[in-house]
Amino acid sequence: MSYVGPEFDPSPSEGAGRPGGAGRRRRGPVVALGALAAAALLGWLAYEAVGSPGGPGGPDGAGGGPGPGGTAATSGKPPSGSSPASPASPSFPGDDAKQPGGAAGPLRGKVVVIDPGHNPGNVRHTAEIDRQVDIGTGHKECDTTGTATNAGYAEARFTLDVAHRLRALLEQRGVTVKLTHDGDSPAWGPCVDERARIGNAAHADAALSLHADGAAAGDRGFHVILPAAVREGAADTRPIAAASHDLGVRLAGAFLRATGEPPADYVGGGTGLVTRKDLGGLNLSTVPKVFIECGNMRNSTDAARLTSADWRQQAAQGMSEGIVSFLSGS
Ligand code: ZN
């Protein structure tokens, strides 16, 4: 969830994005036609066509209420058969991740911190997570409970499930993976400032915070949140802004290709990218870091995907490919 409470205060001004931020995209339309599923290709071309990130900014105030704790089971067993088609030519970020032979060698020693948004235990520790923490540009609650689908599948369970799938995929590539929390360890949180510090202390080469949104029922799509370049209080994201942007663009492209989920139609101007400076998890990071809102849990179409184990595996696959592309630098 994202836009209620502490970690996601309304901040329409932040959606404006960074001018010129799309400059890293390369030869987008020059893709290997035969190598991509038609739907994915169309999705990518649409993605490439929408222009620079940011857009007019979103409502950011639409979030759903706290989730009921979540009852839907998550198997934790990644299903098979969800990998994208054959390798494509290196015409846009992320392709290298799919090439045979992989990059296990070069990726050995790389560290990725995965931050599953919220915590299933937060609902039982509301006093603890309500305390204020310094995020540089202001103060916010330590953490929030997150949103849920209308049927009660909690965002906190979704993020943990995807984190486990993503960890497995990255470890297969030789990456060292650390989670900021894992279910009941700790029992709640950690606070958003601590989530950032965990990535910093690990000297992560990349950090990713996983979320699903709680926007209005008619809104759908995914978006990646990039840190604005801010220097305020304890926050100084200037050194990581460019690298985080690179990470975010690669992540968004690979996620779109792997899942077919469209860029959000309610924030980011259709680019799937939003830049913000009101998130402690980004503001306090000293390593390249982005958030991803995988879909809108309050939208029935998105909810059907978010509650599908097969789709979550596709989501993790896309994230893995985007991260591997970033780590490989190709
Ligand atoms: Zn969230």
Image (cartoon, grey):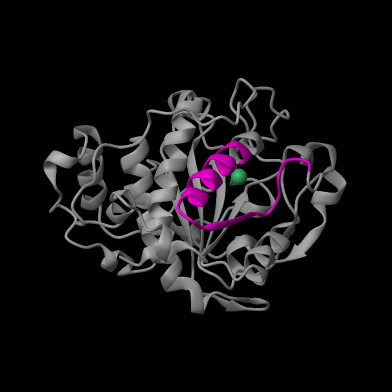
For the point 20% across and 46% down, which residue is it?
A: 45
User: Residue 54, how many percent across, how many down?
Assistant: 38, 58
Residue at x 39%, y 42% (from the top left corner): 264
Q: Residue furthest top?
A: 151
The span picked out in magenta is 160-184
Q: Looking at the picture, how far across and down is residue 318, in whole percent? A: 40, 44
Q: Going 60% across and 69% down the picture, which residue do you hit?
A: 285
- Considering depth in this image, is 330 or 196 the residue closer to the camera? 330
Residue 47 in view, yes or no: yes
- Determine the residue located farthest toward the right in the rendered image: 127
In the figure, is residue 243 to the left or right of 291?
left
User: In the rendered view, does 89 fall on the left or right side of 193?
Assistant: left
Q: Residue at x 34, y 43 (%)?
A: 256
Looking at the picture, tell me which residue is in the foreground, 185 or 65.
185
* Residue 262 visible in the snapshot: no
Q: Is residue 5 left or right of residue 238?
A: right
Which corner quadrant of the figure contains ligand 1? top right
Is the C terminus in the top left, top right, bottom left or bottom right quadrant? bottom left
Q: Position of residue 55 (x, y in %)?
A: 36, 56
User: In screen coordinates, is 100 left or right of 276?
Assistant: left
* Rendered position, 110 above or below 83: below
Q: Position of residue 72 (x, y in %)?
A: 64, 22
